[in-house]
Image (cartoon, rainbow, N blue to C red):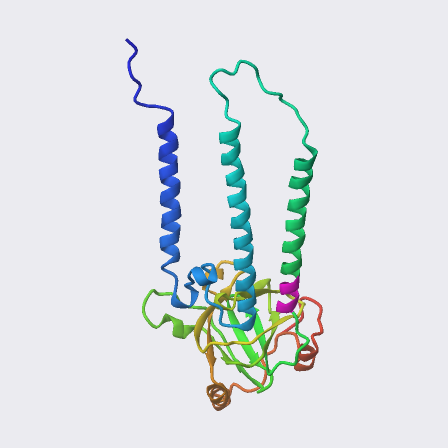
Amino acid sequence: MRQHDSSTPGRPFRRRGALVLAGVLGTLALGGCASGDLRGDASTGWLPHAVTEGGERVTTLWIGAWITLIGVGLLVIGLIVWCIGAYRRHQDDTELPVQLRYNIPIEILYTVVPMLMVVVFFYYTARDESALVDTSKKPDVTINVVGKQWSWDFNYLDDDVHEVGTQAILTGEPGAEKTIPTLYLPVGERVEFVLTSRDVIHSFWVPAFLQKMDIIPGRVNRFQVVPTVEGQFKGKCAELCGAYHSQMLFNVKVVSRADYDQHMADLRAADQTGLLGNTLNREQLMQGQTVPTGGGN
């Protein structure tokens, strides 16, 4: 009598499936531990809730893309299941089916339809990207964001004041957020960020804005946002820039115009007037000119 082998081939696959499922559930659980300003839900496609006009555009594109992809996935799965049922091999089959056969209509279908999908996705992505990086409208507030290893400086160009940032001291104790710089923005007003770097490539990212942009030495990048929600949000560098990249953090406070003006007055009272040097003077920043890499501060 043949002895039963308990190590059946199906068990390793079941174990792997269980591990994959555990990994997915763990990822979802950890995602739910994100800070309040990052947590989304089904209405946003589990993206963070947008707090800018541009963020709402990103959310719409994201949800539309997923609806389309899920529809295509269900169609493909349905066709696979149908083929399994309609063309399954019967027990009394004695001949192999034809191994090579052309079907011109089907081949045209699975060539043309994917091409159309790519064109449609490209159109909507290019349209929204153009809107997100458009800086043709006159801003109400212009702020020069200076990336440096490993913190941020903020030049409020219209008010001729600045904020000096220092590297975050992450002790794990309450109050650590007070050691990092805070960027103030007025709610409901168009803000233009003028991005420059003192040293290496950084990336200016506020996750709740659903938009980021690289900061490149010797180059001026810029984009505009219109904050729509008051509150405090978190910002960080999204480009690996050295040993303490993870500690290159900042806060963002979206406040009323009155509170924004009060903060500008507080910076003046603290003698933080003028603009911090970053190889560019104010006229160059406002005009979007570039300068050679490696200039002095």
> Does any portion of residue 240 appear in the rendered image?
no
- Is residue 35 toward the left or the right of residue 214 in the image? left
Q: Position of residue 214 (x, y in %)?
A: 60, 64
Q: Which residues are magenta?
A: 127-133
Quarter of the rendering containing residue 155: bottom right
Q: Position of residue 258 (x, y in %)?
A: 48, 89
**Height in image: 5 above or below 70?**
above
Quarter of the rendering containing residue 79: top right
- Where, quadrant-wise, is the N terminus in this rendering? top left
- The residue depicted at 47 percent of the width and 71 percent of the height is 250
Instruction: Verify whether residue 113 appears in magenta.
Output: no
**Height in image: 49 above or below 110?**
below
- The residue depicted at 47 percent of the width and 86 percent of the height is 263
Number of numbered discs present? 0
- The residue depicted at 31 percent of the width and 19 percent of the height is 5
Q: Position of residue 68 (x, y in %)?
A: 55, 52
Q: Main secondary structure of the magenta part?
A: helix
Q: Residue furthest top?
A: 1
**Height in image: 97 above or below 121?**
above
> Does any portion of residue 155 appear in the rendered image?
yes
Instruction: State the residue in front, 89 or 292.
Output: 89
**Height in image: 257 above or below 10?**
below
- Is residue 37 toward the left or the right of residue 239 in the image? left
Instruction: State the residue in front, 244 or 145.
Output: 145
Q: Position of residue 295 (x, y in %)?
A: 67, 70
- Where, quadrant-wise, is the C terminus in this rendering? bottom right
- Is residue 13 toward the left or the right of residue 244 in the image? left
